[in-house]
Image: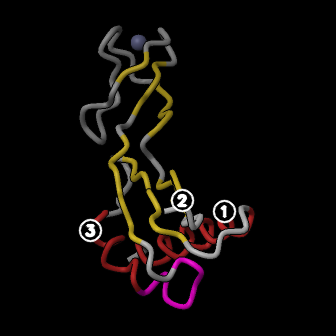
Amino acid sequence: MHEMSTMVRLVNQAAGVMKENGAAKALKIVVEVGEMTDIVPDYLHKYFPAAIKDTPLDGAELETHIAQAEAKCLTCGTAFHPEKQYDYRCPACGGIRCRILKGRSVVLSRVVIDDGEG
Ligand SMILES: [Zn+2]
């Protein structure tokens, strides 16, 4: 179960953003979950209340989005969406060497801060 440690990492990161902005309260954090990770968004939601307890994010909501994976063929340079998790074959040239550009990580996308203006 590394959803809990991932959630704690994201909460720490969000708390850092709040600190940088001098914010006392966050309304919501938005997290992008790459479709090629083994992180289950439902578990992030499940662990979120425990992860934000006694942190500046206490009371905030969690929003998760699935980020589509993107790969780039090293043979012909075509960017494509890997259809299956373990099939990275290039649709243009059939090449099997590619670089995964997106979709393999869980990233903090946005921290919605309560600035006291509504
Ligand atoms: Zn190719």
- Left/right placement of residue 97 relative to residue 82 reads right
Nearer the observer, 114 or 116:
116
Nearer the observer, 34 or 15:
15
The residue type indicated by label 2 comes to Val
Mark 2–mark 3 distance (CA, rounded to whole Å) = 19 Å
Secondary structure beneath label 1? helix
* Render colour scheme: secondary structure
**Which residue occupies the extreme front position in the image?**
117
Residue at which label 2 appears:
111
Q: Which label's residue is closer to the chain start, 2 or 3? A: 3
Task: State which region is magenta.
Answer: 50-57
- Residue 95, by quadrant, is top left
Q: Which mark is residue 17?
A: 1
User: Residue 56: image x %, image y %?
Assistant: 59, 80
Determine crowd level at label 1: few under 14, some 14-19, many 20+ residues with C-alpha closer than 10 A: some
Residue at which label 3 appears:
42
- Left/right placement of residue 8 relative to residue 30 reads right
| Residue beneath the point at 26% across and 68% down | 42
User: Contact, CB < 8 Å: mark 1 with mark 2?
Assistant: yes
